[in-house]
Structures are given as structure tokens and as C-alpha cells.
Image (tube, rainbow, N blue to C red):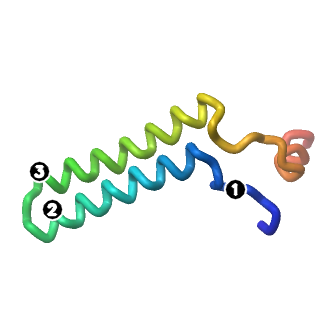
Amino acid sequence: MAGSSHGHTPAAWTGVIIAFIGFCVAGAFMVMAQPVGFWAGMGIVLLGGVVGGVMRMMGLGQKDEHPVHQLATRS
């Protein structure tokens, strides 16, 4: 993967950061035995995926200009 920019986009970073915060929230509430807080954290994790996907559709994700992607679409 040397020279690849896989995952180094604003969409990827934003989605992962939001999901990480959700995992931290869910983990903390799981230790405190608070199911509602746990599920709220899991909702934040899903929100991270949605935000990352929307940002990618807005053009902030990885472009398909990498030579490997071009070869894959030609065959």
C-alpha cells in the first residue's frame, strides 16, 4: 500500500473519529451498567458511518484516480 492514500480523506477521518467517540461512550456506559447510555453510544457509532458516507458522496472521500482502481474498472 505504499504510496496509496487509502483512508486519508476528510470523510474517512471524520467518520472514524465520530465512531471512536461512540465506542468510548458505549464502553463507559457498559462499565457503569447503564443500557440506555450504551445504546446511545452505539447510535453515535452508526452516526459516524452515516456522516462518513454523506461526506464521501459530497466529494470529500477518496477519488477513483489511483492506477489500481483504473485497472480494476477496465477488465
- Label 3 or label 1, whichever comes before in sequence order: 1
Q: How far is the residue under mark 3 from the one under mark 2?
A: 8 Å
- Secondary structure under badge 2? helix
Q: Tell me if 11 is positioned left or right of 1 in this view.
A: left
Q: Residues within 10 Å of mark 2 (few under 14, many from 20)?
A: some
- Which quarter of the figure is the C terminus placed in? top right
First along the sequence among labels 1 and 2: 1
The residue at 41%/45% (across/down) is 48
Determine the CA span between mark 3 and mark 1: 35 Å
What's the residue type where badge 2 is placed? Phe
Q: Which mark is residue 43?
A: none
The answer to whether 19 appears left or right of 70 in the picture is: left
Which residue sits at x=85%, y=40%?
73
Q: Is residue 66 above or below residue 56?
A: below
Residue type, mark 1 in image: His
Q: Amino acid at mark 3?
A: Val
Residue displayed at 91% across by 40% down = 74
Closer to the observer: label 3 or label 1?
1
Tag 3's secondary structure? helix
Real-space Cα distance between discs 1 and 2? 33 Å
**Spot occupied by residue 67 in the image (x, y as percentages of width and height):** 89, 50
The residue carrying mark 1 is 6
- Occupied quadrant, residue 33: bottom left
Residue beneath label 3, please? 36
**Which residue is the site of mark 2?**
29
* Left or right of 66, for residue 61: left
Categorize mark 1 by other alpha carbons within 10 Å: few (<14), some (14-19), many (20+).
few
Q: Are marks 3 and 2 in contact (CB under 8 Å)?
A: yes
